[in-house]
Structures are given as C-alpha cells and as structure tokens.
Image: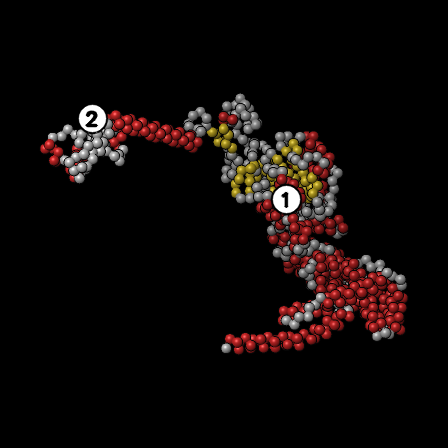
Amino acid sequence: MASARKRWLTDGLDLGSDDRESLPIDFPPPIPGERRAAADSVIYRGSPPVSCLVSYTGESDSDGDSVRLFPTLDQIQTARRTAEAGSRQKSAGWFGSIIVHAVIVLLVAFLIVPADFGGARTQVLVMTLNDDQPEIPIPMMLVDEIAADDSSLLSELEPEAEMLEPVDVSLDVARPVIKLSGLKSKPGQSVGNVSGGSRGSFFGIEAVGQEFVYIVDRSGSMNGVRYRRAIEELKRSVRELREDQKFFVVLFSSSSTPMFQGSRSMAMMEATAENKDKLEAWLATIGAGGGTNPNSSLRTALRMKPSAVFMLSDGEFSDMKTSRRGSLLNAGGDAFSIVQASGGSIPIHAIAFEDPRSCKNMMRLAELTGGEYRFVNASAKTPAQLIADAKAIVAQPQGNARAGRLRQLSHQFGSPQMSGSVKQIYAELLVDEFENTYGDIGQLESIVSVPPLDELFGLLEALVHADPRRLAIASLQDEVAGELSRRLHEADASDVESTCDAVLRWRGSVAVTSVLDRIADHLGSLNHDSPEKAFARLQLVKRVHPRSKAVAVCQAVCDQIRDRIIGESNEMLQRGEVAAAIGKLREARSGQPDPTLRSLTDAALRDLTMKQLVAARDASMRRDRELKNAINEQLELGFGGDPLLDRFRKERISCELNARRMLLQIGSENVYAGLKQKRQQLEAIIRRYPDALATRQAKAQLDQLPKWEAAVEKQEAELIRKMDDTQRR
C-alpha cells in the first residue's frame, strides 16, 4: 500500500530517481506556480490536483493496487475558468455594496449639515432695546431674508426693502405686562405668533397677538354702574384693535351668552369698523342678571385657541359654591378643571372687578395659564387718592348720600391689595371724626352727646367692610361693636330688630361673624309672636353666617315657637278636644309664608292624626265600635272635609302593609349569620313603623333572639367537642 501511495503522489512529475526517494510522501506535492489559480482551492475527492499532460488508463501495480485516473489539462483549465468567473462576481458585489453605503452617508451628512454654509443666505436677529428699562425681556424675531418675497410671512415689510426694519416694541409700560402668545416659555404659560404692533389691552393689561377672546361677567351683582363700566372698557378695547386682528366676545351669568347670541358663526370676527359697530349695537341690548357660572364661556373661548383671553368677573363662581356643598351638579368639572384640561397653553388675563370676593378665583385662573392678574377697584384710584376721598366724605354732613359713598369707599379699602397700614389710617380717620362729635367710644364719662344708632351702625359697617378678615383694625371693630351692643339694650324693640337684621344682611366674613357674636343675645328677644319672621331669620343666618353664635340663638327661638304651637294642641288633645287640636294646627299651617314653619306644622298635624288613626285601629281590634266611631267623628270634624285626612289614612294603611311585608321576608333559620341578619331586619321594622301591628310581632321575635343565640352556641360547642373527640381517636 505504501508503494502505491508513493506512486499516487509522484506520478506525472518529471523527477529523477534520486529525488523521488527524498520527497515527503506523507503530504501532497506542491503545485507549480505557473499552474496555480483560484481553482486550486477546490478540494478534490478523487485524484489529487496535479498538473499532468498524460492521462493513464487503469493499470495494476505489482501489489495489485489499481491506479486512479488523473484529471486532464482540459479539465483543470475548465475548473480554473469557472473559479475566475465566481471571483469576478464576488468582486462586483463588494464594489456595489461600497457604492450604496457611500450614497447613504452622503445623504445623512446633507440632512445634518446646516443649510447656511456661509454663503449669501444669512439670518438676521432683529431686536429693539429701550435704554430706560434695559433689564426687561423684549420680544425677538428671527427673520430669514430669503422669505422677503413672501407677503404672508412679512406682511409688515416692503417687498423691495433689502434690510429688515426693526420691530418697534415699546417697553415704557410700568404696570401692564406684555404676554406673548405662541412661543412656549414654561409650563402653563405661552406666548404667541407675534407681529409688530399686534396687541390688545383690557383694564391696563396688555397682550401681544392677533386674536383675542373677551369673557365678561354680566351676573346680577354686575347690574348698574359696575356693568356699564365693564362694557365701556370692552368697547374701547375692541375699538382699538387693528383690522388685521380678530376678536370674539362671550358674556356669562348663569349660562353663556356668546356674541350675537350665537346667531352667527361661532368663530373669530375680523376687527373691521363694521364688525365693531355691530358689536356695540348688540351690547346695548344685553343687560345684567343671573348667577356667576363661567364654565361654558371658558370652554367656548379655549376651543377657539386665541392668542390670549381677557376675563372679568366680580364675584365667586356658582359652581365653586355648589362643590363646597357637595352638589352632584358639579360633575362636569369646575372652571379650574376646564382650564387644566385644555393644557393651560392659552394665557388668561384675569380681572377681579370691584369686589374682593372675586380675587381668589381670578388669581388662580391667571396662575394656571401664565396670564396676568389684576384687581380693579371701583374708582381705580391709588391708596393716597382713596384716603383723600375719605377725608372729603368725612367733612360732609350726615345723610343718606354720605352713608352710601362711605359704604362704597369702605369696600375699596377692603381689597386684599390694600396694605394694613392704609386700612389703619382709614379706620382711625373715621373713629376720630366720630369721637370728636360724640366723645370717646366705650367711656361713658367722656360722652358729649348720645350718638344716633344709625350713625354708630354706619361707623361699624365701614370698619367691617374695610377689614373683613380682621387683619389690621380688629381692636377698633371690637370697640365699636361693644358700644353698639350696649346701645341696643337701651333701644326700642323695633330698632333692635332692624339693626340686627341689617347686620345679618352683611356679606359673610370673619369680621361680620365677630360682630354677630357680640349682638347674638339681642336676637333671642325678637319675634316670639311672629313665627314666620323668626324662622326666616334662622334660615338666613344658617346660610350666610353658619359659624356665628347667632345660629344657636335663632334656633332656640324657633324651637320655643314650635313647642308652643305643639303644646297648645297637646293640651287640647289631653282634654279630649281632638277636633279643636286639629283645627289649631290647621290654622297655624294655612296661609304660612315660611316653608320651614309650614313643614313644622305639617309634621305636628300628621303625628296627631296618625296617633288617632292607630287608636281607632286598636279599638276596632278590641271590637270597641263606640270608641272607634267617636275617634273618626272627631277627625272628620277637625279636618272639615279636607282631603288631607284621606291622604293620612292611605299613608297609615301603606305603613301597615310595608311592615307586614318586611316581617314575612325575614328568614327563620337558626344559624348565627341568619340570626345577625334577622336582628338587623327586625330593628329596621321597629324603627320605620313603630305603630304598625307587624311591629309588635317584630318586637316579640327580637325578644326571643337571645334564646336562639344561646341554642346555636350550645350546638356549636357540642359540634366542636365531637370533632375534638374524633381527632383524639
């Protein structure tokens, strides 16, 4: 085999006999260089890849091994050409891949590199600075000169101008703040697509933009001079808009009133002279009245996506009041939820108008949207000007006109924007003027003359309204309130009643509650002979001043009146005068204007009638027809044919049937869970229908429950003992 292998490796090579013996026969011989090609990488499973010019036929050596055929030269060249073709295809594939990747890299570079490569197309930063106030941020515009021919982008510029004119933005605004709409600056605040000179103003607040929505309160509290003042400012603001700007107006009270009552398209209107005239004509037909619910108006304004919203209101929102009382009518969301749901991207410039109660809500709306907030008092004057007005009013003689002006001025000093020192100056001015005329307050020996009750009341009213939260002049309020209480002890009952009722009509505040606490005892002496007035006063004080001691005093008065009415009827009933007792209650009920007192007499009349019907039922069950007929006769005589008696009889029958039905539904299973449920059901029958026949059976079953529970516990204990015995076995 070894000799055959040697020949297999060396046949076809031109080697001498001496060299033949020195060949490394264990490895294939090298292929000559001129014969090497790509085909040499092919692994042959048959003959070795040796160049050969002679093709041997099958022969046998001396050992009998057959000699394998070698490939011919033609076969080797064919294989070489095939390999070279494959190599060329591979090279072409790699070259194409390189080209594709190079194109992709060039495209990415083209997108990333800025368009301006330092050529003629440059960008100009246009700014206007004011030397007076260099630290106030000013609006800036980046304008691309290549867009100079596009009139839609540069409507304010002349097409032939090669240089951009700077935008003239005046910074000479001390109080007003310019809010830019459109460019996001921080969460909840936005500034807009600005073009030079496009702005609007409303009660001193300026905003830059092209489109504005005005939301104006027209509730009942705005009626009169206040509403006329707001509408005049609205007309002035719209009149100053340029014709390329747009506007929309929404008035609100209990509901929303869009511009022209929605008879036209609910969309922005161009600020042309014609549209401004139409708006003023429409505003002249709208008056004030109703509640204060801005929800629908806010939704309308925010859906229009204006540059800014100007909103004015003078009081608390109605939905805020209902939400504090837990009303289900607030399910649609309050004003703040509506603004937050919109994203707060549109600034709402909020004006709290003349009434300090509106400050909290309007301030929050502005904070949520990045708008500006402002309180506008009744005269729009500075504290120094208001104090000058106060001195002028104090110098005037007493009278209704002076009292009215002083009341209005006190509300202006009561604004949260007024400092405590300003309130103190105003209060001391009023007290000094009063003491100069009548003597020191609270010091009897210094009294020059007894002050009239209405003037003392007017002084206290001014002090309370000037500081409703008792932050600056609480001591002066207490001194005057104590003097008023002392004077009420000396006044007539009619003066006491009118003074106390006037205090009750003051708007609720901490200061008013303090005053009511001082005069609450006087309320306990009023209207014992006028039940309707007493109950009406109780409802008023509960609604407006729920934290005052006056609530308990008024409630005690009403309880005395109720006990007196029911007591008189009970005395007649004890004497057997059933018809007279019913007539007394019906007389107290008829023509009663106060709903609380009417419901009270209704309840007393119902209880009396139900007891008589139960007594007639019991007499019938005992077969005492004489007593039954006597009771029915008294009832008929007392009601005098009033259909109310038939209603009470039907109600009595309904109670009996309901109680019996509930008793039949109770299960009788003697298990612990069933006993617990049964106890609850029996107690419910006794509580709801105390006079029903089924209630007697319910009470009897309730008395048996302890025995049943003991039996159940005994059964459970026996079962547990048996289980323990089984486990031990």
Residue that label 2 marks: 53
Q: Is residue 176 left or right of residue 629?
A: left
Image point (62%, 41%), residue name? 302
Q: Is residue 203 visible?
A: no
At label 1, counting other C-alpha atoms closer than 10 Å, the crowd grade (few under 14, some 14-19, many 20 or more) is many
The answer to which of marks 2 and 1 sits earlier in the sequence is: 2
Image point (19%, 37%), residue name? 65
584 or 615, nearer to the observer: 615
Residue 48: image location, x then y, percent: 22, 33
Name above or below for residue 446 compared with residue 112: below
Residue 540 is marked as none
> Which SS class for mark 2?
loop
Residue type (three-letter) at the residue carrying disc 2: Leu
Q: Is residue 665 visible?
A: yes
The N terminus lies in quadrant: top left
Residue type (three-letter) at the residue carrying disc 1: Ile
Name above or below for residue 89 compared with residue 624: above
Residue 299: image location, x then y, percent: 64, 43
20 or 279, nearer to the observer: 20
At label 2, counting other C-alpha atoms closer than 10 Å, the crowd grade (few under 14, some 14-19, many 20 or more) is few
> Which SS class for mark 1?
strand
299 or 594, nearer to the observer: 299
**Number of marks in the rendered image:** 2
Residue that label 1 marks: 351
Residue 709: image location, x then y, percent: 64, 75
Residue 30 is drawn in which quadrant? top left
Residue 591: image location, x then y, percent: 84, 59
